[in-house]
């Protein structure tokens, strides 16, 4: 029989378990129900409380922290805080991010009064399980803790599920339980991986055989195999970057990534052929991925609308290994885990084709075969060089464009700065524009399926505080409409002294991506001199917000750039450690013209003489 430990309370138990999982920062907005837990957390001293202006911002920070670190946590107070956190938790659920949502609820006595007398106190609902029921929709385990003796088991069960499923969990704790004694932690929390039994081994072998058969059945014109790997989000979520590296290095197989798995490996690897995003891919990447490669092997890739960029489905010459199973053409092999598939596939490919036997430069091969004109990249190296446009102080100033900004940033990151950066990209045009930046492993974060606008601003906080990326500065790209959703999270950057650089892409104060989705003819100048009224934003002087958030000991700066010369000058300042703009967060208002859009979205814009 396990008895309560007088030296351990429910609050201390949870604090110890979170610290055991390596969590160094807890994000949230306090409330009276949460106070006792935060006091215990501080007394333990292992986890730093990071108060944020909004619960949504706390969730975004915890989300990004978890993507880098492996697990994150946010804490709020009942109903009014929990429902604000719900959006971030929903995004983490969809994108398989391990996040612990702690919700401090009214005390047991108040719940008894509500049941007996119908008395509602602050933040309570007549539906006593309202918070719990809602969070059950976006978590793999949701626990309402009302008994101190049961608290350790409930906490352990939820945290185990969080690690195992790589998705959020929910802990609702009554206020008067925090200081109640309970048993002390015993065995450590570990993920409970699905075992590979005899049946699973047979299924795995059959899946690998089917993949080899698909490769053999789709040779190039010269009879040689021509597969390409499409590495996806689950290689990141399940921490399989090392296994993926082993596979591509041992076999030499060329690979692309999804947008969500961008920079899961260093993008200067000789096998890396770019980010494939359907019709929104760079034309060179689309050509080698869809036209030159003869079959595509998705490893951990999700067939979402963002990853497929306007394409509606994958084909019979695809492999898609994700969500615990593998589809090969029209065949499906359930219960094949990606962590088992990667080494098994590597061994089979090396055995069949030899070490490095699939090594190829698909850019060079396609160029030589088609006798392509000079404006096509002759090699993979030529393609990469074309993505980076060096700055030239002597060139005449030109008005900024989406593509011009990202081309210039690419050169800055690759050739000019000596600092490490984590690029955090928001949804819409910012995400499309940033996907072709060349980055080291771990240098890119985005929310590519949930696509909650403004996510990047709060996420930059978590990215900066995650131990694995702590030396790196966050570089954020966010649209003006998205920034208006979450601008107050710059306050957290300022208070913590984060040296973030936030590029607000101001395209004339309107929702550019929404206009593109609803009436792309606007961008072709067809019968729409102005965007639809509901897409128009109130204009802000975004750069001036820095003065609002800055304090005497917490500097923040804001600048505005309108042309290429101003952007060049700013990037030069970012390389000077003594320049004041590098002392704290920097807000950069990037002035763009209304009709500009990233070239990757051109497939949506009707050509002259056509209709949308």
Image (cartoon, rainbow, N blue to C red):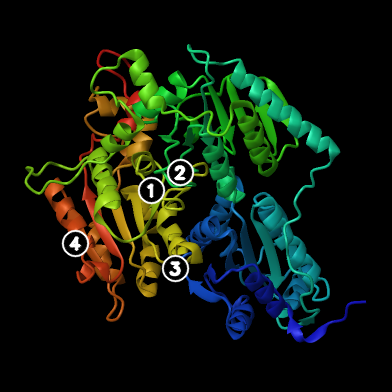
Camera-side residue of 543 and 263: 263
Q: Which mark is residue 573?
A: 4
| Numbered disc in front, either 3 or 2 | 2
Residue 129, placed above or below residue 269: below
Residue found 31% across the figure and 57% down from its top: 502
- Measured as percent of width and height from the top left, residue 453 is found at 43, 48
| Label 4 with label 2: CB-CB less than 8 Å | no
Give the spatial CA distance, label 4 vs label 1.
21 Å
Q: Could one spot residue 240 in this view of the protein?
A: yes
Give the spatial CA distance, label 3 vs label 2.
30 Å
Picture quarter with the C terminus: top left
Q: What element carries label 1?
A: loop
Q: How crowded is mark 1: few (under 14 residues within 10 Å), some or many (20 or more)?
A: many
Residue 385, placed above or below residue 59: above
Camera-side residue of 293 and 81: 293
Q: Residues within 10 Å of mark 3 (few under 14, many from 20)?
A: some
Left or right of 437 in this view: 590: left
| Numbered disc in front, either 3 or 1 | 1
Mark 3 highlights which residue?
53
Left or right of 586 in this view: 322: right
Q: Earlier in the sequence, mark 4 or mark 1?
A: 1
Q: What element carries label 4?
A: helix
Q: Residue furthest front?
A: 354
- Measured as percent of width and height from the top left, residue 409 is found at 27, 48
Q: Residue 278 sits in which quadrant?
A: top left
Q: Earlier in the sequence, mark 3 or mark 1?
A: 3
Q: Which of marks 3 and 2 is nearer the N terminus?
A: 3
Mark 1 highlights which residue?
439
């Amino acid at each position: 029989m396990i008895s309560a430990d007088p030296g351990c309370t429910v609050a201390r138990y949870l604090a110890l378990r979170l610290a055991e999982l390596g969590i160094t920062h807890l994000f949230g907005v306090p409330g009276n129900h949460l106070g006792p837990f935060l006091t215990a957390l501080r007394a333990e001293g292992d986890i730093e409380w990071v108060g944020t202006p909004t619960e949504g911002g706390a969730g975004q920070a915890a989300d990004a922290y978890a993507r880098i670190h492996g697990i994150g946590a946010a804490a709020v107070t009942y109903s009014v805080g929990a429902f604000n956190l719900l959006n971030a938790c929903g995004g983490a659920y969809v994108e398989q991010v391990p996040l612990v949502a702690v919700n401090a609820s009214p005390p047991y006595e108040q719940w008894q009064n509500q049941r007996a007398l119908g008395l509602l106190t602050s933040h309570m609902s007549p539906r006593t399980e309202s918070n719990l029921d809602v969070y059950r929709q976006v978590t793999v385990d949701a626990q309402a803790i009302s008994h101190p003796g049961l608290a350790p088991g409930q906490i352990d069960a939820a945290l185990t599920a969080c690690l195992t499923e790589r998705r959020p969990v929910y802990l609702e704790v009554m206020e008067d339980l925090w200081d109640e004694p309970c048993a002390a932690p015993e065995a450590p929390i570990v993920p409970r991986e699905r075992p590979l039994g005899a049946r699973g081994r047979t299924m795995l072998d059959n899946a690998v055989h089917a993949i080899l058969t698909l490769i053999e059945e789709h040779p190039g014109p010269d009879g040689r195999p021509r597969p390409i790997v499409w590495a996806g989000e689950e290689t990141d979520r399940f921490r399989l970057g090392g296994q993926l590296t082993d596979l591509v290095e041992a076999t030499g197989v060329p690979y692309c990534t999804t947008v969500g798995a961008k920079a899961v490996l260093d993008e200067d690897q000789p096998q890396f052929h770019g980010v494939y995003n359907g019709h929104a891919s760079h034309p060179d990447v689309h050509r080698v991925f869809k036209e030159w490669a003869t079959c595509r092997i998705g490893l951990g890739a999700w067939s979402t609308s963002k990853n497929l960029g306007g394409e509606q489905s994958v084909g019979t010459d695809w492999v898609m290994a994700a969500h615990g199973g593998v589809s090969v053409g029209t065949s499906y092999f359930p219960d094949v885990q990606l962590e088992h598939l990667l080494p098994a596939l590597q061994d089979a490919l090396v055995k069949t084709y030899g070490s490095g036997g699939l090594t190829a430069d698909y850019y060079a091969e396609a160029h030589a075969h088609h006798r392509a004109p000079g404006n096509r990249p002759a090699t993979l190296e030529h393609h990469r060089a074309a993505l980076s446009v060096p700055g030239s102080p002597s060139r005449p100033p030109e008005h900024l464009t989406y593509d011009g900004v990202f081309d210039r940033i690419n050169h800055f990151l690759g050739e000019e700065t000596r600092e490490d950066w984590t690029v955090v990209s928001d949804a819409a045009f910012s995400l499309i524009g940033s996907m072709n930046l060349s980055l080291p492993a771990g240098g890119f974060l985005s929310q590519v399926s949930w696509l909650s606008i403004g996510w990047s601003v709060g996420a930059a906080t978590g990215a900066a505080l995650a131990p694995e990326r702590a030396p790196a500065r966050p570089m954020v790209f966010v649209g003006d409409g998205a920034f208006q959703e979450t601008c107050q999270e710059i306050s957290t950057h300022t208070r913590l002294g984060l040296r973030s650089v936030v590029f607000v892409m101001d395209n004339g104060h309107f929702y550019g991506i929404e206009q593109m989705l609803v009436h792309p003819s606007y961008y072709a100048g067809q019968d729409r001199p102005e965007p639809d009224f509901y897409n128009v934003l109130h204009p802000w002087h975004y750069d001036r917000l820095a003065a609002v958030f800055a304090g005497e000991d917490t500097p923040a700066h804001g600048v505005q750039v309108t042309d290429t010369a101003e952007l060049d000058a700013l990037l030069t300042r970012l390389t000077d450690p003594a320049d004041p703009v590098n002392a704290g967060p920097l807000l950069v208002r990037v002035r763009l013209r209304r009709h500009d859009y990233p070239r990757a979205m051109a497939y949506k814009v009707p050509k002259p003489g056509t209709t949308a």
